[in-house]
Amino acid sequence: MTLSRRKVLRLGAGTAAIAAAPRLTNAQSYPSRPITVIVPFAAGGPVDTLARVVTQRMREILGQPIVVENVAGAAGSTAVGRVARAAPDGYTLGLGIWSTHVVNAVVYDLAYDVVGDFAPIALLTDNAVIIVARRTLPADDMRAFVAWLKANPGKALAGTSGVGSPQHIFGLLLQQATQTQFGFVHYRGGALAMTDLMAERIDFIISDQVTALAQIRAGTIKAYAVTSSSRLGAAGDIPSVDEAGFPSFHVSVWNAMWAPKGTPAAIIARLNAAIVETLSDAALRKRLEELGQDVVARERQTPDALAAQQKADIAKWWPIIKAAGVKAN
């Protein structure tokens, strides 16, 4: 039997509608079972802590359990790859950071595309870092610290949580901004680097707030500057890099939620709404501030804002990383 072109087109449209129907129904009833959020680092660190605080509130809003699963390895790329391969149904999400969704694409040979294989959901926090040093380092402020680095070229040791980590990449930019040279000691985590800083085996770290603030308060290390234009609410006694005389050194690490590519727009919207409601909670925001996590402004909590942030950071950082020849072994 020969079918007319019009009938073929109608049959094709009908088949497409039938295929799309289950996804539409699933989106409308979402969520109907537990959600897994994959965190690309070990339990107990700043990203894990953020995930647990945020998802605890989200599960109340969404009415379903949210399981936080820690998948460490390869600077977060193991976990991010798992999210990329997951079914795009909203039940497997990933909490990624600046390095996992920008830096790793240059440092590692990835089996996924950091842009094309993910659907952005929302930016959560954007955190300046703190330049901290061993207690006995003979400099009491940022200007004196840079002068000490210049007087001792190639002798200072900066701790990092691994090749391509924020501490490493920010250290490369610090060398450019201050025209200094120093070595890197790569650890398997920020906590290990901090332990050696306290023991004075290394000289300084460009550290995340969560790891550094407790030690600064305890007096086991000294702080030089926060890498933003203003002081931290949780540590108002530490000057900003602007105040310290280095306004070009503005760096931060953002945290964001992602879904696999192809996740229905209705599900992305549902998740985004839950995150926006979560981040509007005053008690939760205060708790995050105490943990060194700075919640982004409401207008930056959209999927489009996250996509734009990633695009801008790729344009800024990829040339710097490539020029330095940073590659994971």
Image: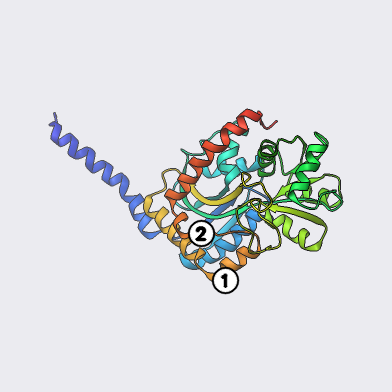
The quadrant of the rendering that contains the C terminus is top right
Quick one: SS at disc 2?
A: loop
Q: Can you identify the residue that label 1 sits on?
A: 283
318 horizontally vs 327: left or right: left
Q: Nearer the viewer, residue 138 or 288?
A: 138
x, y (%) of residue 60? 50, 68
Q: Nearer the viewer, residue 39 or 327?
A: 327
Q: Quadrant of the N terminus?
A: top left
Q: Is residue 119 visible?
A: no
Farthest residue to the bottom: give it. Answer: 283
- Quadrant of residue 215 in the image? bottom right
Give the colouring mode of the picture: rainbow
In the image, 134 versus 247, the foreground residue is 247
Q: Residues within 10 Å of mark 2 (few under 14, many from 20)?
A: some
Residue 290 higher or lower than 195, as above or below:
below
Residue 271 at what x, y percent from top left?
45, 57
Determine which residue is flagged by label 2. Answer: 34
Q: Residue at x 59, y 38 (%)?
A: 103
Q: What amino acid does circle 1 point to?
A: Ala
Please tell me which residue is depicted at 71% across the width and 35% down the height of the picture. Answer: 179
Give the alpha-carbon distance from disc 1 to disc 2, as whole Å.
25 Å
Which residue lies at the image location 61% right of the left edge and 29% below the top edge?
322
Label 1 environment density (alpha carbons within 10 Å; few <14, some 14–19, many ≥20): few
Task: Tell me the tag on residue 121.
Answer: none
